[in-house]
Image (cartoon, rainbow, N blue to C red):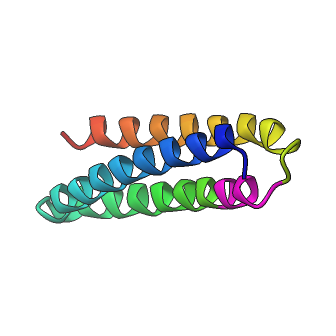
Amino acid sequence: MGEKRDAYVAEMKVKIDGWNHTLDKFQVKANRTTADVLAQSKIEIELLKSKRKEFDEKMSELQSSGETAWEDLKTGVDKSWQTLGDTLRAANSRFR
C-alpha cells in the first residue's frame, strides 16, 4: 500500500473507532427510555449499523485496491463517512 493510502486508512480507522464509541453511548441511552422511544431507538440503531456496514465495505474495497484506483475509491469512502456522521447526528439529536 502507498504511504498516502496507509495514512488515509489509519485516519479513517480512528474516526470509525470514535463513531463506534458514540454509537455505544447512544445505545445505552436508548436502553433507558420508554417503550415507544425504545422502539424508535432500535430502528435508528439498526439504520446506523447498516450505514456503518456500508462504510466498512467501502473501506475494505479501498484497502484492497491498487495504487492508482484508491484515489477514486476515496471519494466514495468520504461520502459514506459523511452519510454515517449525518445519520448519527440526526439520531443523537432526536434522543437527547
- Would you say 44 lies left or right of 1 here? left
Question: In which image quadrant can residue 28 be found?
Answer: bottom left
Prevailing secondary structure class for the magenta stretch in the rendered image: helix
Residue 40 rendering spot, x and y as whole percentages: 34, 57
- Would you say 36 lies left or right of 90 here? left
- Would you say 65 lies left or right of 12 here? right
Looking at the image, which residue is at 56% across and 54% down?
Answer: 51
Looking at the image, which residue is at 31% across and 57% down?
Answer: 41
Q: Which one is in front, 30 or 14?
A: 14
The magenta span reads 57-65
Magenta-colored stretch includes residue 82: no
Seen in the picture, residue 58 relative to 38 is either above or below; the reply is: above
Question: In which image quadrant can residue 42 be found?
Answer: bottom left
Residue positioned most to the left:
32
How many labels sit on residues? 0
Q: Which one is in front, 34 or 68?
A: 68
Residue 57 rendering spot, x and y as whole percentages: 67, 61
